[in-house]
Image: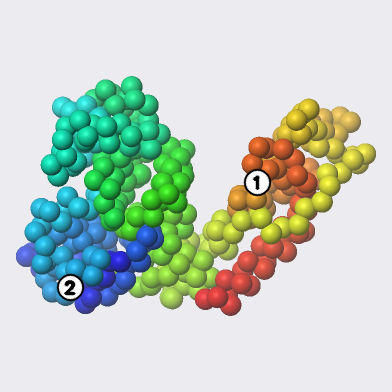
Amino acid sequence: MIQFDAVHKRFPNGTTAVHDLTLDMPEGGVTVLVGSSGCGKTTTLRMINRMVEPTSGTIKVGGKDVTDQDAAALRRSIGYVIQQSGLFPHRTVLDNIATVPLLLGHGRRKARARAAELLETVGLTAEAGKRYPHQLSGGQQQRVGVARALAADPPVLLMDEPFGAVDPVVRTQLQDELLRLQKELSKTIVFVTHDVDEAVRLGDRIAIFRTGGHLVQCAPPAELLARPADDFVADFLGAERGLKLLSLKTLAAVPQGPAPEGDTWSLVCDETGRPLHWASQRTELPVRPLRDGDSLLAALDESLASPTGLVARVDAAGVLTGVSSRDDIHAHAGQAHADARVAA
Ligand SMILES: Nc1ncnc2c1ncn2[C@@H]1O[C@H](COP(=O)(O)OP(=O)(O)OP(=O)(O)O)[C@@H](O)[C@H]1O
């Protein structure tokens, strides 16, 4: 757990970057800091590992006041990932990842073995480990940045716009990877972003700041979307709050029935039962089969694209389990909103 208690940061030039911040960031969860440019997100993050010192107030990590600890040792014990990956250009990828374990006194062999393991964890090949950072794509460099931050197995990971400089497709992949890793590792993560969708996707809790370093609201994404504290938060979350909420709910509970046969449209599957397309006498249209873990938003989208309004459901192996109707999906979407309003 990371605890901010009445933390204030005023820079020598008179700028107040963080104003009286009291905030708990739960252990093993992802707390996302969002807000417009200059509202104090990075300053908040950097006070956790003492790259910036607060003017007043206390910050505790795991119950210990950070100012009671040696700043360099503290920094090494906390993973830190930034937008431009911050890799050493003249060291190979493997050596970059091994940096902190080496600093911590692990032998060279052990540090490199750990680095090789991590390379795989973040989805890179052993061959990539031999290259230099400039020989990797932006997305790959960010993966190396994450691997390097994880190398000393720190309980806390600070991530400052780590996926801000890559294209939307790679960004989604990196978010997926982070969610997968987090399921296994349960780190306490503090993640800064400008992107509301990224915040909703990754955050267990989202803290919204406004200019002057004021925290406006901190809540789980569903609660924030269902009941923003004020107009600032509502505006910041954007017009499609309802749809964003549906991105948090899965399709699992929506009933399914058998696929239609002998109708105008039929669902054609291959010999193993995997859906191929919708077919009528005159034409074929694509099908996007969904799994239980896919979102209600994806289901709603597919039900609108589907010529029958039906969504093909598949199991983990991609084999058809049934279809769900647009009406049933819509009903669950409405229920998700009602539940969020009650829970908020
Ligand atoms: N070293 C510094 N000296 C003076 N002012 C600073 C310093 N670092 C940051 N600031 C100011 O403090 C405020 C908060 O900055 P910070 O970088 O924390 O915001 P941010 O929310 O992370 O912004 P962005 O989203 O643009 O990265 C800004 O007004 C910034 O100009």
What residue is at 19 percent from the left and 41 percent from the top? 101
Q: Among all residues in the image, which is located at the extreme left? A: 12
- On the image, the x and y values in percent for residue 46 come to 20, 58
In the picture, the disc for residue 291 is 1
Q: Is residue 109 left or right of residue 208?
A: left
Residue 336 placement, left or right of 210? right
Q: Residues within 10 Å of mark 1 (few under 14, many from 20)?
A: many
Question: Seen in the image, is 19 located left or right of residue 124?
Answer: left
Of the residues shown, which amino acid type is indicated by label 1? Arg
Residue at disc 1, secondary structure: loop
Mark 2: secondary structure: strand
Q: Where in the figure is residue 314, as x and y percent of width and height?
A: 70, 43
**Where residue 185 sits in the image (x, y, percent)?**
38, 51
Q: How far, Cα to Cα, is label 2 from label 1?
A: 45 Å
In this orientation, which residue lies closer to the viewer: 239 or 198?
A: 198
- Please tell me which of labels 2 and 1 falls first in the chain: 2
| Of residues 30 and 264, the one drawn nearer to the viewer in this rendering | 30
Name which residue type carries label 2: Thr
| Residue that mark 2 sits on | 58
Q: Quadrant of residue 196?
A: bottom left
Q: Is residue 323 above or below residue 135?
A: below
Residue in the image at 43% along x and 76% along y = 230
